[in-house]
Image (cartoon, rainbow, N blue to C red):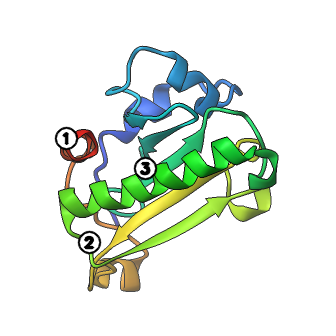
């Protein structure tokens, strides 16, 4: 029998599963820490993925609810890339990863749970971060609680 303990998932399991866009709703709230929002610019924001692929997994998201990059104007697109660059520097400062996987989710088939609101995923990578657990048992081990990661990244984004 395989047993994995992930108590932070209970909040999600018991939460109201509204069909509203989290990328539109969460930035409106005055609860950045609880919503894992790390950084805000004039046109985009950065939030952690609550169920990360790896420690420090973040998303860069435009405030504008659009399905694809070509729906963004030049000013928003430039800001999107500047925020992406700032995110790389901040994650490097906080965690010193050896590389990154960066991808933009556009459309449902691309794996976007929020198919009508495009967003960029950034996953820091280290040599050996896909341990035997992933290879043999399809289990990912995240070495730090999500709120501890938030605190480290928040400080890096502000400096």
Neighbourhood count class around disc 3 (C-alpha, 10 Å): few under 14, some 14–19, many 20 upward: few
Q: Secondary structure at mark 2?
A: loop
Residue 8 shows in this picture: yes
In the rendering, at what x and y percent does residue 90 appear? 29, 54
Q: Residue at x 37, y 78 (%)?
A: 134
> To which residue does mark 1 refer?
155
Residue 97: which numbered mark, if any? 2
Q: Residue at x 28, y 51 (%)?
A: 5
Distance of mark 3 from mark 1, alpha carbons?
Answer: 21 Å
Is residue 97 left or right of 30 when viewed as pictured? left
Badges 3 and 1: C-beta atoms under 8 Å apart? no
> To which residue does mark 3 refer?
51
Q: Nearer the viewer, residue 69 or 30?
A: 69
In the rendering, at what x and y percent does residue 6 appear? 31, 48
Neighbourhood count class around disc 2 (C-alpha, 10 Å): few under 14, some 14–19, many 20 upward: some
- The relative height of residue 28 versus residue 44 in the rendered view (above or below) is above
- The relative height of residue 16 versus residue 74 in the rendered view (above or below) is above
Q: Secondary structure at mark 1?
A: helix
Chain-order first, disc 3 or disc 1: 3
């Amino acid at each position: 029998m395989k047993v994995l303990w992930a108590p932070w998932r209970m909040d999600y399991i018991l939460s109201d599963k509204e069909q509203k866009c989290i990328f539109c709703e969460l930035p409106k709230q005055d609860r950045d820490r609880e919503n894992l929002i790390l950084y805000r610019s004039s046109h985009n924001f950065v939030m952690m993925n609550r169920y990360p692929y790896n420690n420090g997994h973040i998303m860069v998201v435009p405030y504008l609810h659009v399905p694809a990059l070509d729906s963004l104007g030049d000013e928003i697109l430039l800001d999107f890339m500047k925020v992406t660059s700032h995110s790389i520097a901040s994650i490097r400062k906080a965690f010193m990863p050896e590389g990154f996987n960066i991808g933009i989710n556009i459309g449902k088939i691309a794996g976007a749970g929020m198919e009508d609101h495009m967003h960029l995923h950034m996953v820091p990578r280290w040599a050996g971060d896909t341990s035997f657990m992933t290879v043999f048992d399809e289990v990912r081990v995240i070495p730090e609680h999500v709120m501890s990661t938030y605190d480290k990244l928040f400080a890096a984004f502000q400096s």
